[in-house]
Image (cartoon, rainbow, N blue to C red):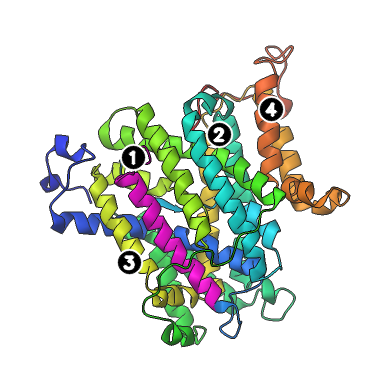
Amino acid sequence: MTDTTIGTLEELRDPNYTPPLAKAVPLGIQHVLAMFVSNVTPAIIICGAAGFGFGSNSPDFPQMIYMIQMSMFFAGVATLLQTIGLGPVGARLPIVQGTSFAFIPIMIPLVAGKGVDAMAVVMGGVLVGGLFHACLGLFIGKIRFALPPLVTGLVVTMIGLALVKVGIQYAAGGVPAIGTEEYGSALNWLMAGVVIFVTLGLKFFTRGMLSVSAVLLGLVAGYVVAFLLGEVNLGNVGRAASFALPNPLHFGLEFSVAAIIGFCLMAFVSAVETVGDVSGITKGGAGREATDKEIQGATYADGLGSAVAGLFGALPNTSFSQNVGLIAMTGVMSRHVVTIGALFLILCGLVPKIGAVISSVPIEVLGGGVIVMFGMVVAAGISMLSDVNWNRRNMVIFAIAISLGLGLQLEPGALQYLPGTLKILATSGILPAALIAIVLNLVLPQELSGEATEEVSGGLSGHGAGSLGGGK
């Protein structure tokens, strides 16, 4: 949607420039369309993992509508913190915030099968983790050395690998249907398949808004097919309110050691990812490096936005990388364009009927979109790993970290004798993998003994370019 009539090249690169309203509004809505599905999906997944939300007859179904509503509202609030700023908080750049996928593997063990009451533990973790995340802004530049592409790429890959199972389960009929005749039926896979194929078609054979919104439009296509097949229940849309404000301490707060440690450790990784996104925005949109003040302000906004969200029953948020690419594509660096998108998100978050419509999407349809999204998370991690110099040292670090991390996640029973808190953290997979990679990267010498003469098993000696000197 690049349009030279929006402004001069100098104006387009200026974050403080406001395009004409007729151009700014569509550009702002385009940012929302690019992140909308990814923003509301984590809330649906966590509700499903806790065992409530799916099925209009569930007494806790309104709670899922509320969480979807808050995902939109606080994504908008956190985005305003980034674009408008509040004192030292905010980068004052066109950064779009949304609910983070990174924390899902940490949250699932905390809520698995425990119902809506388990959400208090999650919100306690979101609050403390968000405050910790904000504190990282004081010295974020000094800790980036501990998270080179080897570590961040591994973590992002592990996040995707931890979630791909969820996509398959949803496409097959959802966790509640496992073991039934309906699970994995042709009808279920038909609905999921429509989403996947339409998404791929739009992504590769269209341009502009259609390509940017491919996943969203794929879900719409799957929803239409499901509706025609009689698989959509709109009963809750009529019963949902037309307007509702956020409810403080909606799920309450409960502080668990496992939740606090897990959220704080993932906040560490999320902070460095945000630094990468800020750098990507300034390079792609303005052709310059991000300043220390911008990076610090973005980190403050990341953490504060998450902490406030936890007080109202929403999940942690982070900067959305897909919108970084959108800025490079449109060539419009204006933060006020993203502010318009943020206001649109807040408006959506105040209308429960929108949440009710989203919650009426059959889980099989959502599964099709989730398969694409989580696969893209894995692909993003692999792309980050392409910057690693794959010598023998780095291959050993990666091998041990992913083997133990993924292995413990796949076989949690191997740690059945660990105390509850340690077991939750260790079987998340991501945390042990990240910690192992960070520690080994810091303590192992840059060259293993005899590395120059030894060949990696199978002839797979690395030849990729890049260094381990900086994060994403």
Tell me if residue 185 comes above or below residue 397 in the rendering: below
Cβ–Cβ under 8 Å for marks 1 and 4: no
Residue 336 picture location, percent across and down = 24, 49
- Among numbered discs 3 and 1, the one appearing first in the sequence: 1
Is 75 magenta? The answer is: yes
Discs 1/4, front: 1
Q: Which residue is mark 4?
A: 439
Q: CA distance from mark 4 to mark 3?
A: 44 Å
Q: Amino acid at mark 2?
A: Leu
Residue 2 belongs to the span the image colors magenta:
no
Task: Read off the residue under disc 1.
Answer: 87
The main secondary structure of the magenta stretch is: helix
| Mark linked to residue 221 | none
Q: Which label sits on residue 385? A: 2
Classify mark 4: helix, strand or loop: helix
Residue 174 visible to an observer of this rendering: yes
Disc with the residue nearer the chain's start (4 vs 3): 3
Residue identified by numbered label 3? 347
> For this rendering, which residue is in front, 455 or 82?
82
> Could you classify mark 3 by the number of other residues whose Cα lies within 10 Å: few (under 14), some (14-19), or many (20 or more)?
some
Which is nearer the N-term, disc 1 or disc 4? 1
Q: Amino acid at mark 1?
A: Gly
Of the numbered discs 3 and 2, the one sitting upstream in the chain is 3
Q: Regarding mark 2 in the picture, which secondary structure is present there?
A: helix
**Residue drawn 38% across the image and 40% down it:** 89
What amino acid is labelled 4 in the image? Val
- Calculate the distance from the C-alpha at mark 3 to the C-alpha at mark 1: 24 Å
Give yes or no for contact between labels 2 and 1 (Cβ–Cβ under 8 Å). no
Q: Of discs 2 and 1, which sits in the foreground? A: 1
Q: Which residues are magenta?
A: 62-89
| Distance of label 3 from label 2 (alpha carbons) | 39 Å
